[in-house]
Amino acid sequence: MKSTLLKSMTLILVFTVILVVIIQKTAQTGAPAFSALDMAQYPKKGTREDYLTRDNAPDSLALLPAPPEEISPTFKADIVAFQEGLKLRTTARGELATRDANLAPEALSDIFTEVLEIKLSPQTTPVTYNLIYRMGWDLGGYAVYDAKHHYNRARPFMYYNITSCQPDDEAGLRKDGSYPSGHAAMGWGWALILAEIVPERKEKILQRGLEYGQSRVICGAHWQSDVDAGLIIGAATVSRLHSEPKFASQLEAAKQELAIARQKSAAQPAK
């Protein structure tokens, strides 16, 4: 799986740089958990306070190529990545992939705890937590669903008629196109912003963001090409968010908040 991820990342980093340049030039909680079905329906509701809207979020259908055809080398690589991921299901990495599938607010607090060396929460870091939570709907909803709805690609667990690592969510996932991956878009978007907030931890934060997206392949919820496309959309959405005054203001406040929180955490005696 390492070789697959390295090849994918070379492509993603190139696309990320290109998209950031293009889009920049053209351009509290206690809320319910995200779910595949809610995310699929949400862009039509327009009832939450988000940074973006369906109209001004990146257009995934315009930005992305069509998902690979079954006769293509890319789909063959998708199959190899799926098979490699399946072998990891019963390992510690597979357990992490299952935890990464959980989009409940309390799970959101834990995704980057280890790499940030501090736990995000509504109580201790309300500004940063709210920033990340609100971004989730822009990244995993508005920015991905034009392509998801248009292509309605079958997920790996559907293609192979097996169980994913989140069987309770499969009914919703079946109604929710696989391409691009909303989880990957969210994980990479969150990582890009957190790396900006805590630059001294950027390598570990970015690695965790990539790992979060890769968990979807291990779970059988997404193909590798879905995840790769999700990373592109995540980068595009972050670039777009930077042009929103409300987001930019909250980002600066989050930088100050986390700097203070990390100083306090470092000053506490080790347990």
Image: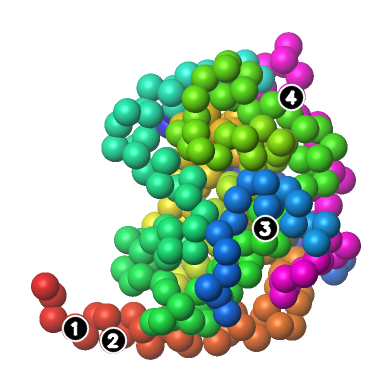
Q: Tell me whether circle 2 and circle 4 mark residues in contact (CB < 8 Å).
A: no
Q: Position of residue 71 (x, y in %)?
A: 73, 11
Report how far apart the C-alphas of labels 4 and 1 lie in the structure.
51 Å
Report how far apart the C-alphas of labels 3 and 1 lie in the structure.
35 Å
- Indicate the quadrant containing the N terminus: top left, top right, bottom left or bottom right: top left
Q: Which comes before the other along the chain, label 3 or label 1?
A: 3
**Residue matched to label 3:** 139
- Indicate the quadrant containing the C terminus: top left, top right, bottom left or bottom right: bottom left
Q: Foreground residue, 110 or 63?
A: 110
Residue 62 lies in quadrant: top right
Judge depth for marks 3 and 4 and give the one in front.
3
Q: Amino acid at mark 3?
A: Leu
Residue 202 lies in magenta, yes or no?
A: no
Seen at 46% across and 78% down, the residue is 122
Q: Amino acid at mark 1?
A: Gln
Report how far apart the C-alphas of labels 3 and 2 lie in the structure.
31 Å
**Residue matched to label 2:** 264
